[in-house]
Image: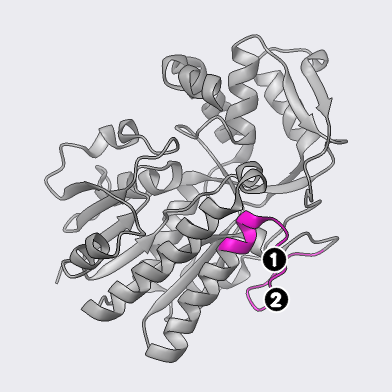
Amino acid sequence: MNPRILVTGGAGFIGSAYVRFLLGPRAPGGMAVTVLDKLTYAGSLDRLDAVRENVDLTFVQGDVCDASLVSALAAEHDQIVHFAAESHVDRSIEDGGAFTRTNVLGTQVLLDAALRHGVRTFVQVSTDEVYGSLPHGAAKESDPLRPTSPYAASKAAADLLALAHHHTHGLDVRVTRCSNNFGPHQHPEKLIPRFLASLLAGGTVPLYGDGQHIRDWLHVDDHVRAVELVRDSGRPGEIYNIGGGTSLTNLELTHRLLALCGADPERIVHVENRKGHDRRYAVDHTKITSELGYRPRNDFAAALAETAEWYKRHSAWWSPLLDAA
């Protein structure tokens, strides 16, 4: 039987890429996909333009915390892939309540509905930030969680709730934890699009602290391909790290962005470090590689250049967002 998949947050940056992957021209077909998205500042139906006319796509505007709506949708679907989340660390420092509501309560509402209606598979999409800052090495799925920001703590709580529903109720839960995503259509509150947009608009780029904070970078297309491998072939109750394989300091990344925009280093403005700023994230994705055959396909340098070109061509999309970011 062809799956009926409910994708929460499917108008967001990563969720929409997943929907385009499921319903695009190279997709296997035969999937009925419903997007549930609240359309907050971070959601945009423009991201679904490539598949909006697909007869297998249904869009529902709504909140994952709306128990009645979520229950009705869960009753009509076999699987849930849960992307919906408040995700910007800076915003979580200013207002952690919104993150707890959406990321924790929203996940619980979805899990309750999944149990009530016999949803077959529940994929909880999470982040490497739940492992906290690592002085060296890379986090394995079995490592303890040490979140330090309100955002990361809310995602860790959601992961634990989901896994508890597998242990207690036997719900087929599969958790993914990815490194930093980038690519077209990303809201300019995040580092790469924020810096690209600022440079293209003739402005400066605000770099936190000494710029030596290290992140692993993952193209969004590689991420959603990995999520689909987990949904299709992952094991119940398991966690899968998804890495990109390119670790850079924020300063190194900034210089690459400067070069792509033809800008001078004088455009960098060092600003006061963010509160509790984790120094380094890294995940070991050996498990998903050995079990499911995942490997990142996008060359980082080429993908970063393609992303910069997209932002150069789509200033009408990001300019209003940059002003509000």
Q: Which amino acid does label 2 sit on?
A: Asp
Q: What residue sits right under mark 2 in the picture?
A: 143
Any part of residue 29 in sight: yes
- Between 99 and 299, the one nearer to me in the picture: 99
Residue 10 placement, left or right of 224: left
Question: Is 151 contained in the magenta span?
Answer: yes
Residue at position x 70%, y 63% from top? Answer: 147
The spot of residue 259 in percent (x, y) is: 71, 19
Q: What residue sits right under mark 1 in the picture?
A: 131
SS assignment for the magenta stretch, majority: loop
Q: Which stretch is magenta?
A: 137-154
- Between 118 and 57, the one nearer to me in the picture: 118
Instruction: Please say if the residues under marks 1 and 2 sit with CB atoms less than 8 Å apart.
Output: yes
The spot of residue 95 in percent (x, y) is: 60, 47
In the image, farthest residue toward the left: 55
* Quadrant of the image containing the C terminus: top right
Give the class, few, some or many, for how many residues have Cα within 10 Å of label 2's Cα (few <14, many ≥20). few
Any part of residue 309 in sight: no
The spot of residue 73 in percent (x, y) is: 20, 62
* Quadrant of the image containing the N terminus: bottom left
- Between 158 and 11, the one nearer to me in the picture: 158
The spot of residue 260 in percent (x, y) is: 65, 20
In the image, farthest residue toward the right: 210
- Between 51 and 93, the one nearer to me in the picture: 93
Q: Is residue 154 above or below residue 27?
A: below
Question: Is 108 contained in the magenta span?
Answer: no
SS at badge 2: loop
